[in-house]
Structure formats: C-alpha cells, structure tokens
C-alpha cells in the first residue's frame, strides 16, 4: 500500500471544528473603513489593544504553518526617534503614537518545523495524521532548504524541471530570492490582519515601505537573513489624517472570470 499523501488523501481523524460566524455587512464596513492614515492625534493606544491586535496578526494564514514573521513593537524612545527618521520622517510615522515593524524571516522555518513536530507529539487527545508528521519531518527540509549559496536550490531546480515534464510540480521555492518572496507573502498577510484588527478596535494604521531597510535592520539588530516587510504606524486618525477619497481603478482591470 502506498503512503498517504498529505495533499490528496483526507486523513481519518477524530476532529471537527465548526463556525457559525457570518457577518458580511460588518466585515464590509470594517474593510471599507480602513484607510491609510498619515496624521494621528496623540491619543494613546491601550496596551491591551496593542497586544490583542498583535495576537490577531499571528492568526493569519501562512505557508506550511511555519510562521515566518516577527513583529517589533518599538517602545524605546530613542529607537522610536531613529525609526521615524529611517521612515524618511514621514508624517504617518512621526505623528503615530505607536509603530510596529513587521519582519519576514526566511531562515526560521527550521525552528518552526521542530515546534510543529513538538506540538504534534504533545497532542494527546487528538490524532495527528501520519502524513502531517512525515510532511514536517521529511518534506519541509527538502522543500525549504536551499543549501550554501543556494546550491541545493539549484539542484532542485534541475530535478523539478525534469519532474514537471510529466506532471504538475511545485516549482518554488528553489532559490534564496524565492525564500524571500515566500517569507514576505505570509508576513504581508499577517500585516493585513494586524491593520484590520486595529480598525476593528477603532484605530487607524498605515503600512510603510518608504523606509531605509538597512538602517531599520541595524536598529532592530536583525540578523542578515531577516528582512523588513513593512513598518505599520498606528493611532487615532486626526481630522487631517486621510488625504483624500479612496481611489480604485476599474475592477475589470483586476478581476477576471476565466
Ligand atoms: C506595501 C505598502 C507600502 C506602503 N508604503 C507607504 C509609505 O511608505 N507611506 C505612505 O504614506 N503610504 C504607504 N502605503 C499606503 C498606500 O499608499 C495606500 O495603501 C494606497 O494609497 C491605498 O490607499 P488606502 O490604503 O487608503 O486604501 C503603503 C501601502 C502598502 C501596501
């Protein structure tokens, strides 16, 4: 008998999770009311709200549940002044009561893989699919290792191009830049969770990529493989905080029914 495939074979588990949540009107209002805010009042944000929203960010979907993100809530006054400056002194950073820097980690998957295997081993009540254990044990190292200077990635690229002749084959990540994209994708999803969470609590945000990546990395003492995905300013919008009505182009440019 062939081994179960985690992607195609549905495991027989003693677990089910239901949700009756449905509130499209509230969600529509939430999404529509999120605007990028460039000027804030100096009203402080309660610690509890900050922590809750950060917790909600961590619930974002992410690749293989390897959670390749970190969030630096910059509290030190000295660091904060530098961060404002490294965000090019943008008004949104300067006036924000709080700033969070979202960091993408293409290098923490090894730790996360071990944590997943540990979580599985501690899950006594609920059965874990053998295919899931095998996925983190065997497939994850194969999929995410790139080797010194991307050498293993290069070998994967060649092997995958042969495999893909006869069947659909996942082609990424097979290079260090693929790993950067990989980590940034999941981190950006968590950023959206974070921004919507703040909105739900009555606060505003602005994603910031107009920053000096190298200086911010040094400020946060990030390791070489860590990358600033974006900074996020947070606060209560000032009357002048939103610079104009929202502009979106014709939806036919973006939404394709195929
Ligand atoms: C990745 C990313 C980076 C951004 N960087 C900046 C920035 O550095 N400064 C800024 O004022 N706005 C920044 N924005 C906000 C965009 O300008 C804004 O989202 C866009 O104009 C649409 O407006 P809305 O968010 O109000 O819908 C950024 C947005 C994203 C998603």
Image (cartoon, grey):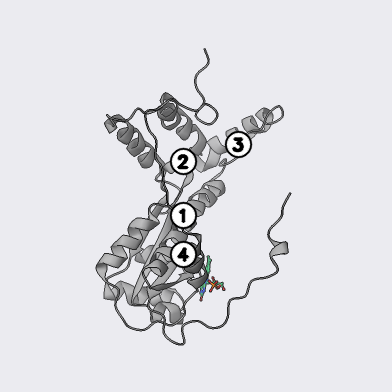
Q: CA distance from mark 4 to mark 3?
A: 37 Å
Residue 170 is situated, as x and y percent measured from the top left of the image, at 60, 36
Q: CA distance from mark 2 to mark 1?
A: 26 Å
In front of the other: label 4 or label 2? 4
Residue tagged 4? 26
Mark 3 or 1 closer to N-term? Answer: 1
Residue tagged 1? 22
Residue at 68% x, 61% y is 254
Residue tagged 2? 64
In the depicted view, which residue is nearer to us: 63 or 221? Answer: 63
Residue 21 is situated, as x and y percent measured from the top left of the image, at 43, 52
Residue 110 is situated, as x and y percent measured from the top left of the image, at 39, 39
Q: Secondary structure at mark 2?
A: helix
Residue tagged 3? 170
Mark 2 or 1 closer to N-term? Answer: 1
Q: Is residue 222 visible?
A: no
Mark 2 or 3 closer to N-term? Answer: 2
Q: CA distance from mark 4 to mark 2?
A: 30 Å
In the depicted view, which residue is nearer to us: 249 or 23? Answer: 23
Q: Residue furthest bottom?
A: 240
In front of the other: label 2 or label 1? 1
Q: Secondary structure at mark 3?
A: loop
* Residues tagged 3 and 1 counted as in contact (Cβ below 8 A): no
In front of the other: label 3 or label 1? 1
């Amino acid at each position: 008998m062939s081994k179960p495939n985690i992607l195609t074979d549905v495991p027989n588990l003693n677990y089910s999770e239901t949700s009756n949540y449905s509130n499209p009107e509230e969600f529509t209002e939430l999404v529509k009311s999120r605007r990028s805010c460039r000027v804030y009042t100096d009203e402080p944000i309660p610690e509890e709200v900050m922590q809750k929203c950060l917790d909600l960010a961590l619930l974002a979907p992410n690749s293989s549940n390897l959670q390749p993100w970190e969030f630096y809530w910059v509290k030190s006054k000295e660091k904060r002044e530098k961060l404002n400056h490294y965000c090019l002194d943008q008004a949104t950073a300067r006036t924000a009561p709080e700033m969070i820097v979202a960091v993408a980690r293409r290098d923490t998957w090894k730790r996360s893989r071990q944590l997943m295997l540990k979580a599985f081993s501690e899950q006594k009540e609920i059965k874990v699919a053998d295919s899931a254990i095998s996925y983190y044990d065997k497939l994850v190292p194969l999929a995410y290792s790139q080797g010194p200077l991307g050498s293993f990635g290069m070998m994967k690229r060649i092997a995958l191009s042969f495999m893909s002749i006869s069947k659909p084959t996942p082609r990424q990540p097979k290079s260090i830049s693929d790993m950067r994209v990989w980590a940034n994708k999941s981190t950006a999803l968590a950023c959206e969770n974070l921004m919507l969470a703040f909105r739900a609590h009555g606060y505003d945000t602005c994603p910031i990529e107009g920053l000096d990546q190298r200086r911010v990395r040094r400020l946060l003492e990030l390791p070489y493989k860590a990358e600033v995905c974006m900074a996020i300013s947070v606060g209560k919008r000032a009357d002048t905080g939103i610079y104009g009505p929202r502009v979106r182009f014709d939806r036919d440019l973006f939404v394709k029914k195929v």
